[in-house]
Each structure stands twice: as C-alpha cells, then as structure tokens.
Amino acid sequence: MIETITELDVLRERVRSWKRDGLRVAFVPTMGNLHDGHFSLVKRAREHADRVVASVFVNPTQFGPNEDFARYPRTPEADARGLEAAGCDAMWLPSVETMYPYGVDATVRVQVPAVTTTLEGASRPGHFDGVATVVSRLFNQVQPDVAVFGRKDYQQLAVVRYMVRDLAFPIDIVGADIVREANGLAMSSRNQYLSADERAQASEIRRCLEAMAGAIHSGQPREAVEAQAAGRLAQAGFEPDYTVVRRQDLTEPAAGETGSMVALVAARLGRTRLIDNFEFDA
C-alpha cells in the first residue's frame, strides 16, 4: 500500500531506511492531477530502482501572473490511488510552507542560463527559474538515485539535465517517452480544460509536427517549414506561440544541416495552452 508523507523528517527517514537496506530509490516529480502519462513515468522509474517516490506539489514559483495557478486542479486522493496502482511506494505531499520556509517571495532561487532563454523561457518569463528552484529542493528532500521526467516537456528535461550536471547532483536523469491519447494528442493535465470539439481539434498539433519533420527531411528550408507550420495551426483555429525545428540540444541548426532534430510547438486553443514535440533524424 502506498504511503502518503507530508513531513520532511518522515520522508528522509523512509528513504534512509531503504538505502540502509541497499535499495535503489527513484523519484518522479509531479504537480498532481495525474493521468496515464504520469503513471507511465512511475512504471519507467520502477525499471530503474527498487523503490519509487512521487511528489505531488503545485509549485507557485513556476506560474506567471496571468497563468492558471489558482485553477490548477488539486486531486491528491485520486493521485494516491493512481500512484499505488502504478507501483509507487510513497507519495511526497509537502505544503508550500515546507517547500518554501521563508515564503515564496523570500526564497533562494536557482537560475539555469542559456537553455532557459528561448521557447518556453521567452514565452513564460521566470517559468524555468521556478522549475529549477523547486526541482533542486525536491532533489535535496528526496535524495534519489534516479529521477524520471517526461519528454513532453522537452525543454524542462534539458533544463534539469543542465542543472544536475552543473551542480553535480548524484542523480541519473531518465527521459520517458510521450504518452498520447488515441487521436495523437499528448497527455496533459491541461487537456481537461478542452471542450470535446477542442480536444478533437487539438490532434492537429501532432499532425503538424510530423509534417514539419517530413518537410525538413525532404530538404525544405527550416525557416519556411516553421512559418508554414505556424500558418497551418492558425488556420486550424490555434494561436501559435512558436513552431520551430532545433537540434536536440535546442540550439538552432545551420541551413541544410542533417542529424538528430526536434520539432517543437506551443499554441493556444481557446483558453488552453498546449505544447508538444517530435524527435526525428533529418
């Protein structure tokens, strides 16, 4: 049966006891309101460890002033049931006061340079400072051997990997594949904000990403491919934030460059902002 832990000293003693027994500990950080995509991360974590801890914490420092922190769904009881079914051993459910003992405005913050300045970082200023700040705290609290992050938040995974290497966290970072709905829409807690018509419409993002990859593979110029993708989404009723092709380290490829690439899209549909990506070889 899964154990729900709300006190930091209890969490640390539980992890210490596992490690005294020679067990390897994996960690899956989440903001709750969990779905099959999250549960797939737990199952992936189980492949790398003997015990799995998942956190459920809606982090105020990664939301902008006009974003959806207040309406972000909180469903800890359902989350616990789903985590248990997925094979999780403990759910770490800290309060804001536990996470930020001096308050959100007076907290020590972690900033990751370079990889945070484009795409999501440009569209959502300060977002990745909040991500790096909370993930570094969670790593310190849980002290896992391995942590699993989904590839849907592609830039977030890059930020975490940069931070872990630069700050020498003794943690292996595993990227897990995107889990999709039947129509190709990447699973996300924000999908529940979509109406039935919007949910069907949102499958166009996946088709757009695949078309971008195909166009690059056929030799079309990157700038033209990106512009065509933005136009395609706008025509389909979206408000695109960005439609880009990058190297898999998120730097811009040279004209005609081949190799491992990723197409990335962020777009609004109604009140909901959706992100997705598609890795491919050019």
Image: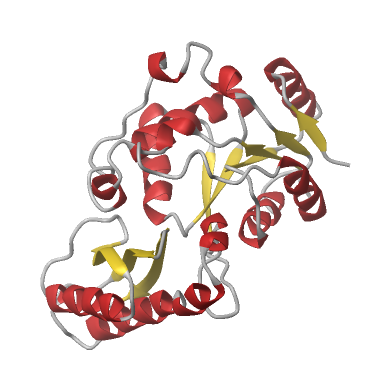
Task: Kindly indicate the quadrant of the structure image that contains residue 253.
Answer: bottom left
Q: What x and y, as percent, mark residue 183?
A: 55, 80
| Residue 42 appearing in the image | yes
Vertical order, 148 against 277 (above or below): above
Q: What x and y, as percent, mark residue 75?
A: 69, 44
Q: What x and y, as percent, mark residue 68?
A: 45, 45
Left or right: 217 with respect to 152? Answer: left
Left or right: 176 with respect to 229? Answer: right
Colour basis: secondary structure
Vertical order, 31 against 274 (above or below): above
Vertical order, 61 against 49 (above or below): above
Pick the quarter of the image with the N terminus. Answer: top right
Pick the quarter of the image with the C terminus. Answer: bottom left
Judged from this view, the residue extending furthest toward the top is 102
**Observer-nearest of 273 and 207:** 273
Judged from this view, the residue extending furthest toward the right is 1
Q: Residue at x 27, y 81 (%)?
A: 235
Q: Residue at x 51, y 67 (%)?
A: 186
Q: What x and y, as percent, mark residue 250?
A: 27, 56
| Residue 164 appearing in the image | no
